[in-house]
Amino acid sequence: MRRSLFSALLLFSALLLFGFFPPKISHAATEGRAECVVEVTSRRFLAEKNADARLPMASTTKILTAIIAIEDLDLEEEIVIPKEAEGTEGSSVYLRAGETYTVQDLLYGLMLRSGNDCAVTLALRRSGSIAAFAEEMKERAMKMGTEHSDFANPHGLPDPDHYTTARDLALVSAYAMQNETFREIVSCKYYAPRGWKNKNKMLWQYDGANGIKTGFTTAAGRCLVTAAEKDGMQLVCVLLNCPEIYERTEELLDGCFSSFRMIPLLDATMPYEGFAIKYGFAYPLRKEELSLIRIEGITTMPCPEVRGEVAGQLFIYLENRLLFSENLYIM
């Protein structure tokens, strides 16, 4: 293994992406009881506080409900509203039993207007009962990387067995934000077919905001999950039980966008020392971390050499932590 000129050139180019930036996140607004910021593609956490504390999350629950419905149901399917959904406690789009809505309509009602009745309708359509849907939520969330969450319903109304952590919720949200349909829904300010306006003020007041979901109950306090993209870096910010959700979210996002850049460390169109690679790789880094990146390759040349055969492996490290690896191929 050896460090290459290839890595040195990439890091030199990365330095050009950085200008002056403040390294600290300000704290003028009241902090949340739990908070974190994650970069979506790498799942690197850029800021966190009490990120593993188990807390109620109110209607931010609907992020998981929405992505399950998007992945498992036909958006054009028409659903007759069941009696169980009519009059659901809390926020509502006032569905009436016997009315017909498409899955797409219900998803917009769920995420823009926080309709608990939409959540119940989608859960019943997907799983037949609230209990069965809650079990599905647990299983799917674990596949997304959660470790300290439990779910009792699809909407987030208080229940002792319904909780998450800022970190778990960030992982679910990062997963959801990689779905094109989900991104389209949560970034929508108005849903014209039903006349629904998005409750998430961040879409209007923060440059680059493109989702995701507000939440409030007396038990959970004010909660907010925000997605924002700048300079090719997509972040998700989670606040649980925060009195000043919008102000604090802006502070966290501003600090992370200022302190980190999404650095392209590998370009799939560029050979690595005469070998082909299939995948590019970018990672959020602070300026002072650039010198700690190490890109190394090891070759195990086949005999005879055949174009397209594996010739070795390439590794990218941040200090001694492996970030990425992939095969090298004969060109």
Image (tube, rainbow, N blue to C red):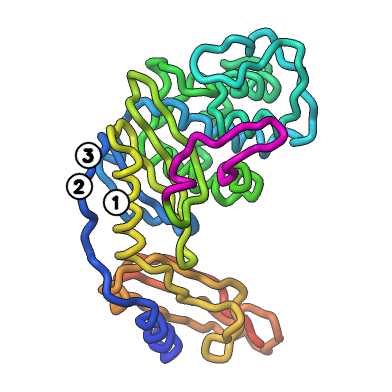
Above or below: residue 301 compared with residue 212: below
Quadrant of image for the C terminus: bottom right
**Residue in front for this viewpoint, 81 or 159:** 81
Query: What stretch of residues is rendered in magenta?
Result: 186-205
Amino acid type, mark 1: Glu
What is the CA distance from the residue labelled 3 to the residue labelled 1?
Answer: 10 Å
In the picture, the disc for residue 28 is 2
Q: Is residue 264 left or right of residue 102?
A: left
Residue highlighted by disc 1:
251
Crowding at dot 2, Cα within 10 Å, few <14 / some 14-19 / many 20+, comes out as: few
Q: Position of residue 210 (x, y in %)?
A: 52, 50
Mark found first going from the N terminus, 3 or 1: 3
What is the CA distance from the residue labelled 2 to the residue labelled 3?
Answer: 7 Å
Q: Is residue 201 magenta?
A: yes
Kindly identify the residue that appears in the image at 35 percent across and 81 percent down.
15
Quarter occupied by residue 217:
top left
- Callout 1–callout 2 Cβ contact below 8 Å: yes
